[in-house]
């Protein structure tokens, strides 16, 4: 954009040195600068919510925030939520906990986020209380892993919310629990998966299938399987058929995907100021893609495969990703279903439909999807039909940052308009070129004068949009010690796998393990020379 590498005016070493100066500038004031920035956001956005907590040494130990757009998204798509702690996002090793949901495009969105120093019940309860206060409502269902602190915190703070365990985390442990022989038995794996993963099973059918697998493979007295069966209402799909799961059907994969996404923007060297800046960039990109999908849905119409009115209705009503899922069902139904009987019933026709597999259905010639089967959250107008009745105040958009952004957008728009009008006309292009070259010369002269009076500190303050406080009241957190902050504990399976890959040292004489050449039995058996 500036012309060439020589016009950038800085090297990679300069950027490293600048970060060194930045960290020195915010040293000691890291936490307080973040809190003060949140207060500024609150002044600009009345619906911005945040809270923080200090320990006995006045060090920041807990932090939660949710901006206006995040809270509005929750009102529209907060029926089901998932969250999973992630590590290595900041230099203090605070645990990052983003709250993740699914929008009407089946894409992941972030409802809010928190930082905590410890993964204990008290910290999670504090985090969930603030989430509940910020949103005003609790989700119908929350999906997490089997963290013992969460098992206590969620029922205490959100008693009306169903807590569901991640099925993937549970089923991943099966191989370690049953032993090598049964873990490699494909018939056992297939039978267990058919009982556990099938979301069409009723509670009674699941319990019968589970009992059959346990008896057939002598697992009735197995301690771990007995524990999982007692907790079946917290993870088996049959027990959640009364709750709309919104795409987060069985696992925390959405949260793990979000953790990976944020990991592209953050690293374990980030200060809190840098972390918040990177978090805002990640959220900005996420919302940009969401707006792109909204725009594509409004400006284009997906291609239909059949002449059915019901498919055209779905194309006009649902977002593209949802429509394509619906279209697959319509297309498959054309080959798996057939009308076997048509009768006249009081002036209307009644159809008998046979499906491959023996299922029989009767309907009265439905041409469109009945309203009772349309879930508003999957439609293009989902944001206009929020699930929760919350009135949001209009936020002012007259702040300096937004004004500059608006002017910049207008400037780019005018530039491209002028370029489009002048393109192909040499005279007009020459006039435009000379005008821009003249303007460029004036801007370069002004910048050189500005650089002469610019100090490194003023540059840092302009980038951070904040100044270091004269008095520090909130201290940066101490480096936390959690299961994700040090060396990870390995399972027995991982240890055995690594041991199998490790090259065993052998004797130089007989090439056998367990001894060296000096103590080799074959060498001792040789006669003395």
Image (cartoon, rainbow, N blue to C red):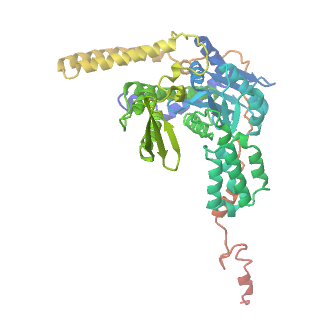
Q: Nearer the viewer, residue 205 or 386?
A: 205
Q: Position of residue 118 (x, y in %)?
A: 75, 34
Looking at the image, residue 432 lies above or below residue 304: above
Tell me if residue 440 can be seen: no
Q: Position of residue 23 (x, y in %)?
A: 62, 28
Whether residue 383 sits left or right of residue 419 in the image: it is: right
- Which residue occupies 58% across, 37% down? 254
Tell me if residue 363 can be seen: yes
Q: Nearer the viewer, residue 196 or 392?
A: 196
Q: Residue 144 lies in what quarter of the image?
A: top right
- Which residue occupies 60% across, 43% down? 200
Q: Position of residue 447 (x, y in %)?
A: 42, 17
Give the number of marks: 0
Q: Nearer the viewer, residue 153 or 119?
A: 153
Looking at the image, residue 113 lies above or below residue 354: above
Q: Nearer the viewer, residue 526 or 65?
A: 65
- Identify the residue at the far right of this view: 56
Looking at the image, residue 125 lies above or below residue 44: below
- Which residue occupies 74% across, 58% down? 215
Q: Classify the position of the C terminus by image quarter.
A: bottom right
Whether residue 426 sits left or right of residue 159 in the image: it is: left
Q: Position of residue 25 (x, y in %)?
A: 62, 23
Q: Classify the position of the N terminus by image quarter.
A: top left
């Amino acid at each position: 954009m500036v012309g060439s590498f020589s016009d950038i005016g800085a090297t990679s070493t300069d950027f490293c040195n600048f970060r060194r100066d930045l960290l020195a500038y915010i040293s000691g004031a890291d936490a307080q600068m973040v809190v003060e920035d949140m207060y500024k956001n609150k002044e600009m956005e009345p619906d911005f919510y945040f809270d923080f907590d200090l320990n006995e040494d006045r060090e920041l130990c807990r932090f939660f925030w949710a901006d206006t757009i995040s809270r509005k998204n929750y009102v529209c798509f907060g029926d089901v939520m998932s969250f999973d702690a992630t590590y290595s996002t900041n230099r203090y090793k605070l645990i990052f906990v983003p709250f993740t949901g699914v929008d009407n495009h089946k894409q992941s969105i972030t409802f809010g986020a928190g930082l905590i120093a410890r993964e204990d019940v008290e910290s999670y309860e504090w985090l969930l209380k603030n989430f509940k206060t910020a949103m005003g409502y609790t989700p119908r269902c929350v999906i997490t892993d089997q963290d013992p602190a969460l098992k206590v915190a969620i029922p205490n703070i959100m008693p009306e919310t169903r807590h569901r365990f991640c099925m993937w985390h549970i089923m991943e442990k099966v191989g370690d629990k049953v032993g090598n022989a049964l873990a490699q038995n494909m018939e056992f794996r297939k039978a267990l998966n058919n009982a556990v993963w099938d979301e069409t099973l009723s509670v009674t059918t699941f319990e019968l299938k589970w009992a059959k697998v346990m008896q057939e493979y002598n697992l009735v007295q197995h301690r771990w399987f007995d524990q999982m069966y007692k907790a079946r209402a917290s993870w088996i799909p049959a027990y959640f058929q009364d709750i709309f799961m919104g795409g987060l059907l069985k696992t925390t994969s959405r949260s793990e995907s979000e953790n990976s996404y944020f990991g592209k923007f953050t690293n374990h060297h980030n200060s809190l100021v840098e972390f918040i800046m990177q978090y805002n960039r990640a959220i900005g990109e996420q919302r940009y893609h969401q707006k792109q999908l909204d725009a594509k849905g409004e400006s284009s119409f997906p291609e239909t495969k059949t002449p059915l009115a019901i498919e055209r209705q779905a194309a006009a009503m649902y977002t593209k990703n949802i429509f394509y899922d619906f279209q697959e069902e319509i297309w498959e139904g054309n080959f798996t279903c057939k009308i076997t009987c048509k009768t006249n019933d009081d002036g209307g026709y009644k159809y008998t439909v046979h499906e491959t597999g023996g299922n029989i259905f009767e309907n009265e010639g439905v041409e469109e999807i009945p309203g009772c089967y349309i879930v508003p959250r999957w439609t293009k107008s989902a944001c206009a039909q929020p699930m929760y009745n919350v009135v949001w105040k209009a936020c002012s958009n007259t702040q300096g940052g937004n004004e500059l952004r608006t002017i910049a957008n207008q400037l780019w728009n005018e530039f491209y308009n002028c370029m489009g009008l002048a393109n192909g006309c040499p005279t007009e292009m020459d006039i435009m070129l000379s005008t821009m070259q003249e303007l460029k010369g004036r801007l370069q002269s002004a910048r050189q004068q500005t650089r002469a009076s610019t100090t490194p500190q003023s540059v840092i303050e302009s980038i951070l949009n904040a100044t270091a406080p004269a008095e520090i009241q909130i201290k940066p957190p101490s480096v936390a010690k959690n299961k994700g902050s040090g060396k990870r504990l390995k399972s027995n399976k991982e240890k055995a796998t690594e041991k199998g890959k490790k090259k065993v040292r052998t004797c130089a004489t007989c090439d056998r393990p367990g001894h060296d050449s000096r103590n080799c039995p074959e060498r001792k058996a040789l006669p003395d020379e």
